[in-house]
Amino acid sequence: MTHAIIPGSFDPITLGHLDIIKRACALYDRVTVVIAINADKEYAFSKEERIMLAKDAVKDLKNADVDSTDGLLVDYAAAAGFPVIIKGLRNKTDFQYELKMVQINEELSEKRHSRRVFTMFMPATKSLSRISSSYVKKLLANGKSCKKFVPNEELLKKLYKKRP
Ligand code: PNS
């Protein structure tokens, strides 16, 4: 069985993320969205909320599931039997950032598991390449609609209102 993981912060999940997940589902038998923690980021939504939003977004995809990790991505990948890691790329900035992540993860994987971890880049669909979680959060903060950019605006707005 082929297995791919799509790790990220998903703070919150967008239609851009969902497009990458759907396309990965057409290529792999199983696709796991992994809600991870980037120590450099402050999150607007808790891990549980990000999981809830991601689960709701993939509920109609038969071969997609959602999981999370508080640890290193390579430790998650090792425990899962080294599935391929998929990352979506919208632009040059994403590419530069993700290439750095690939290099960090390859080094960590060799050191901690004596095994190479593989990352595949998937280019974003052009019409979705301007969508970002940061932009969605700006719209939410200003009480504007974000339904063109997220799969689940109602749930997102409900969770956003509940924040401390
Ligand atoms: O796109 P994101 O939000 O930065 O994705 C988060 C994550 C953890 C998948 C990414 O930052 C990554 O690949 N990091 C590699 C190092 C790692 O595993 N960090 C987690 C603990 S600090």
Image (cartoon, rainbow, N blue to C red):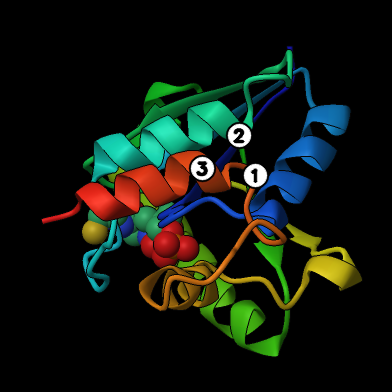
Q: Which residue is most to the front?
A: 143
Pointers 2 and 3 in contact (C-beta within 8 Å): no
Query: Where on the picture, by quarter, is residue 68?
Result: top left
Asked whether mark 1 lies closer than 8 Å to ligand 1, one says no
Q: Give the alpha-carbon distance from disc 1 to disc 2, as whole Å.
A: 6 Å
Kindly identify which numbered label has been placed on residue 110. Answer: none
Q: Could you tell whether 29 is left or right of 45 in the image?
A: right
Residue 114 appears in the rendering: no
| Residue 107 rendering spot, x and y as whole percentages | 40, 61
Kindly identify which numbered label has been placed on residue 151. Answer: 1
Pointers 3 and 1 in contact (C-beta within 8 Å): no
Asked whether mark 2 lies closer than 8 Å to ligand 1, one says no
Q: Give the alpha-carbon distance from disc 2 to disc 3, as whole Å.
A: 12 Å
Q: Secondary structure at mark 1?
A: loop
**Does label 2 or label 3 sit earlier along the sequence?**
2
Nearer the camera: disc 3 or disc 1: 3
Q: Which residue is most to the left?
A: 164
Query: Where on the picture, by quarter, is residue 11?
Result: bottom left
- Residue type at mark 1 is Pro
The quadrant where ligand 1 appears is bottom left
Q: Could you tell whether 99 is left or right of 29 in the image?
A: left
Q: Residue at x 84, y 41 (%)?
A: 23
Pointers 1 and 2 in contact (C-beta within 8 Å): yes
- Residue type at mark 2 is Ala
Residue tagged 2: 57
Q: Which quadrant of the figure contains the C terminus?
A: bottom left
Residue tagged 3: 154
Q: Residue at x 52, y 69 (%)?
A: 136
Residue 5 appears in the rendering: yes
Q: Residue at x 50, y 36 (%)?
A: 54
Q: Residue at x 79, y 67 (%)?
A: 128
| Residue 50 rendering spot, x and y as whole percentages | 37, 43
